[in-house]
Image: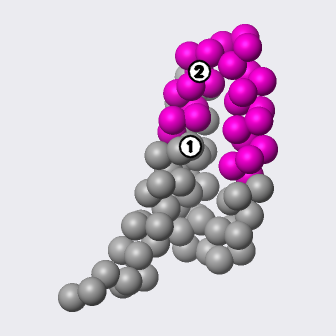
Amino acid sequence: MELAWAIVGIVVLLALIAASRLLRRLVLAFAIAAVGLLLLHMQTAPGEALVALGAMGGGVVLARPLRRMLWGGFPT
């Protein structure tokens, strides 16, 4: 259940990042810190850490297209 809440938190955070410039600027520092902590967590529970890293990486990859869709950046 904790893993599901972590994934939900990441999705919510990335949705906020798509809408806010300030949060978008802080995502790099958050991502670096989270990757470091998940690499440490991988020593005790590698499955959970890999799933969380994958979810975070996928969300970071989708942040730019989501932002473009929300703010009308696609050409018509």
Q: Which of 69 and 42 is in front in this view?
A: 42
Residue depicted at 65% across the width and 77% down the height:
21
Q: Where is residue 15 in the image (x, y as percent from the top left)?
A: 52, 61
Read off the residue under disc 2. Answer: 48
Q: Is the magenta stretch mostly helix, strand or loop?
A: helix
Q: Which mark is residue 20?
A: none
Upstream in sequence: badge 1 or badge 2: 2
Residue 4 x %, y %? 53, 30
Mark pair 1, 2: CA separation: 12 Å
Q: Which residue is drawn at 51% across and 39% down?
A: 55
Which span of residues is magenta-colored?
A: 30-55
Tell me if residue 34 is in the magenta stretch.
Answer: yes
Q: How many C-alpha atoms fall within 10 Å of the one at disc 1: few (<14), some, or many (≥20)?
A: many
Residue 34 lies, in percent from the top left, at 72, 41
Circle 2 — which element?
Answer: helix
Look at mark 1 in the image and give the residue it sits on.
56
Q: Does the magenta stretch include residue 61?
A: no
- For this orientation, the residue located farthest to the top is 44
Q: What residue type is labelled 2?
A: Glu
Quadrant holding the C terminus: bottom left
Count how many numbered circles sit on residues in the image: 2
**Quarter occupied by the N terminus:** top right
Q: Residue 39's image quarter?
A: top right
Q: What amino acid does circle 1 point to?
A: Met
Q: In this view, does 22 lie above or below 52?
A: below
Q: Circle 1 — which element?
A: helix
Residue 39 is at least partly visible in this image: yes
Check whether the beta carbons of the residues at disc 1 and disc 2 lie within 8 A of each other: no
Say whether residue 54 is left or right of residue 66: right
Residue, far left: 76
Residue at 52% over, 27% down: 51
